[in-house]
Image (cartoon, grey):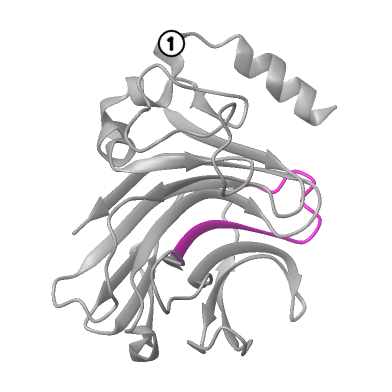
């Protein structure tokens, strides 16, 4: 039923209500592609790099003429932007992703991801894993409704090792989050105040890219609104 409601709402939108109609989102959309509902290209819901003019669907649209909406239901399903630029964590020039974002867990059962650093698995000797996921979790370590940074600690595809860092209670409104990578260091800044630093030199062999949107790790539905989304390099 929830999917049907969103489908009816989205189909009532017109071209001026597409995310690309707002100048503030054009830069990020020009350098991204849309993956939905899976990572493989789906002609109904996916978009190739930079091909967003006049485009929206039930998983990706503009709300209130202000915000990009990413909506999705179902375990391992996603509506995400995959940014084209690839880089290594040992980069001498900083690369960053800044978001002003509001989260709606809806009936998500356990967890969903809204920002990522992911390795390019298409390259030789790479890994099909994210170095970093910024996630909402319903409950972890007796903390309910918190935001977490999930950092993969092993570059080995067959070794599961993660550090999970509590970024605080999920704000009820929009909040700022910035991810910065430079010289094998990862910085995460929340609301221009809380800063977290990590050594990620063990990941320097891989090329990576940023992702943003909503990706469910379990059953249910979730929605994410972006007021700002900016990559700088």
Secondary element under disc 1, as helix, strand or loop, is helix
Residue at figure coordinates x 32%, y 24% from the top left: 22
Identify the residue at the far right of this view: 1
Q: Is residue 220 left or right of residue 14?
A: right
Dividing the picture into quadrants, the one containing residue 168 is bottom right
Q: Is residue 114 magenta?
A: yes
Dividing the picture into quadrants, the one containing residue 113 is bottom right
Identify the residue at the far left of this view: 93
Q: Which residue is mark 1?
A: 15
Q: Is residue 175 above or below residue 14?
A: below
Percent position (x, y) of residue 17?
Answer: 45, 16
Q: Is residue 9 left or right of residue 25?
A: right
Q: Is residue 214 left or right of residue 127?
A: right
Image quarter hosting the C terminus: bottom left
Q: Is residue 25 above or below residue 117?
A: above
Can residue 174 be spotted in the picture? no
Percent position (x, y) of residue 215?
Answer: 62, 52
Q: Is residue 160 above or below residue 67?
A: below
Highlighted magenta segment, given as a residue range: 104-117
Residue at figure coordinates x 85%, y 27% from the top left: 1
């Amino acid at each position: 039923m929830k999917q049907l409601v969103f489908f009816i709402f989205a189909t009532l939108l017109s071209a001026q209500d597409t995310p690309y109609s707002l100048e503030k989102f054009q830069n990020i959309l020009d350098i991204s592609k849309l993956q939905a509902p899976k990572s493989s290209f789906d002609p109904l819901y996916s978009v190739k790099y930079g091909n967003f003019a006049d485009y929206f669907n039930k998983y990706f649209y503009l709300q209130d003429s202000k915000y990009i909406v990413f909506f999705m239901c179902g375990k391992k399903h996603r509506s995400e932007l995959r940014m084209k630029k690839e880089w290594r964590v040992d980069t001498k020039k900083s690369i960053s992703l800044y978001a002003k974002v509001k989260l709606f867990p809806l009936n998500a059962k356990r967890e969903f991801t809204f920002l990522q650093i992911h390795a390019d698995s298409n390259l030789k000797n790479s890994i099909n894993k994210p170095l970093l996921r910024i996630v909402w979790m319903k409950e972890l370590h007796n903390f309910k409704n918190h935001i977490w940074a999930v950092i993969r600690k092993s570059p080995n595809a067959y070794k599961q090792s993660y550090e999970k860092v509590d970024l605080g209670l999920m704000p009820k409104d929009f909040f700022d989050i910035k991810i910065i990578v430079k010289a094998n260091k990862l910085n995460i800044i929340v609301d221009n105040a809380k800063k977290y630093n990590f050594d990620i030199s063990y990941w320097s062999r891989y090329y990576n890219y940023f992702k943003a949107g909503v990706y469910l790790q379990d059953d249910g539905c979730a929605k994410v609104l972006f007021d700002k989304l900016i990559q700088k390099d």
